[in-house]
Amino acid sequence: MRTHSRRALLGAGIAVVGSGLPAARATGEFSSGPHSGTDGRDHARGPHEPHDRPSDYVAPDGPEVAEAERKRGSGPVREFRMTPTAARIDLGGRTVHTWAYDDVLPGKEIRVTAGDTLALTLANHLPQSTSVHWHGLSLRNDMDGVPTLTQRPIMPGVSFPYRFTVTRPGTYWFHPHSRVQQDRGLYAPLIVEDPKEPLSYDREWVIVLDDWLDGVDGSTPDDVLAELNHGMGGHSGHGGGMHMDEGETGGAGGDHGAPATGGSRRAGGPSRILTGSRSTLLGGDAGNVDYPFHLINGRLAEAPDICRAKPGDRIRIRFINAGGDTAYRVALGGHTMTVTHADGFPVEHAKTDALLLGMGERYDVLVTAKDGVFPLTALAEGKKHSAQAVLRTGSGRAPGRSTRPRELDGKLLSAYRLRAAESARAVARRPDRTVELNLTGSMAKFDWAINGRQYSPRDRTPIRAGERVRLAIRNHTRMWHPVHIHGHHFALPDGGPRKDSAIVLPGRRLDVEFDADNPGLWMVHCHNVYHSESGMMTVLGYLKG
């Protein structure tokens, strides 16, 4: 149960690190060699940009990055150790073989205070290389966790020391940026406390949503990617699901350590291609992957996560969508939610019955607990399945696993109906540069790309420090895409909230703006892990000088 009393939160301690594994190097221009991408391959490249030499751009460990980190200051050091490893996980009556952080799902929550220095040693006990991306944080570039772009892959048997200053409070999470590892059990919440917390509440309940297939009837995410790349119109796609990082010779981990086939339509388990999923909220097709399970805090609805509180308690619920291919519509039966934050930034408080979260999005809400037993339901939007947790403040029978609170069909809010709080509003300014991001590709060919080019870290769109940058995002596909930017937060139009992830519906356009105030090489990509690993990623690179 991811729930905390306010008193416990204020007195939380820290974990101390120690590792006997060799440390990985964290220096160098990682994408100038013969390998590239989160899978270590040099994929299809388009026309060169005007600045196409690595020496034109700020390096992830360059002096500009070090200076930006110096300006952030260095508060108390909070030390942690984390070990990704093969694990047997009980989902609540169903045990699966997967990969997880320290044998728990989700991984153990990391909680720090804004201004702290987070120091985490990752000791890789997996059969393939990995990484950690700190989703939503504006941090130093060489700690962003994108293999062969901002750091070298963390090879099996090697440890890597992540260390950076955390500046902004909010609800965040972390996961690998290596192949489709995120769609295993490798994810965990990261909560950054506000030392001047303006909200008043009695308890917290951290809710991590996830779609699950790893280890179910022989399925793995690697095999699903291979099936999607090869089984939809016969297109070979982006490497066919057989991905290798720099320095590896094989073994994509298709069977938790054994090599994935990569060249066949399906290496094991039933077909996981989803057809006929429809959602008006998502503009049509709801998703690509048919997940057998949907989880809240690593638990099936048959054995749900339970938050125990007292009637009248004011509860802060932090929602995180850690799914690979699923948007969730969430509601707490019998309660109205007051939305306070989106992607870590405060918004003007807004009441709602339900929320829609795309992959990577986070929302904080406040509820005043009533007396009884209530379902917290996450509907897999357009997929006819759901996940469930329980709020218990009194006696009574737990709700059935198929309970559908009426609030799910009541007033619904998404990011576009929220407004930034005054403290989080972007200062009005003309954009200095407009970057066109055309989302392209199709389900039939599974050739997802940006501007018609599949990802290569050598292809960089130049920006300069100090600029106001407008991202003109155009979705030319028939699928919705949750677009995520690394190291920055953009402002939604017309006074909308500050966010790092936003849903772009099929056939729609979205103009967002951010200030280029964090030098380095930064990804922009679809947070559907199968779309991104099939090519829907690109890089914004700060020019030197």
Image (tube, rainbow, N blue to C red):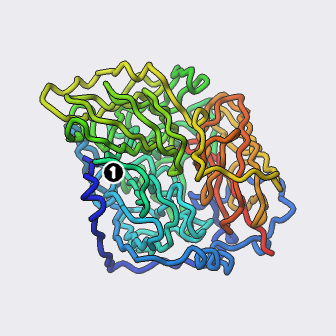
Q: Is residue 277 left or right of residue 209?
A: right
Q: Is residue 109 left or right of residue 437?
A: left
> Which residue is disc 1 drawn over?
106
Residue 281 appears in the figure: yes
Q: Is residue 479 above or below residue 434?
A: above
Give the secondary structure at mark 1: loop
* Badge 1: residue crowd in 10 Å (few <14, some 14–19, many ≥20): many
Q: Is residue 59 above or below residue 385?
A: below
Residue 252 appears in the figure: no
Q: Quadrant of residue 34?
A: bottom right
Residue 444 is situated, as x and y percent measured from the top left of the image, at 64, 29
Q: Residue at x 80, y 70 (%)?
A: 53
Total label count? 1
Residue 534 is situated, as x and y percent measured from the top left of the image, at 61, 45
Q: Quadrant of residue 104?
A: bottom left
Name which residue type carries label 1.
Pro
Looking at the rendering, in which quadrant would you find the C terminus? bottom right
Front residue of this view, candidates 419 and 452: 419
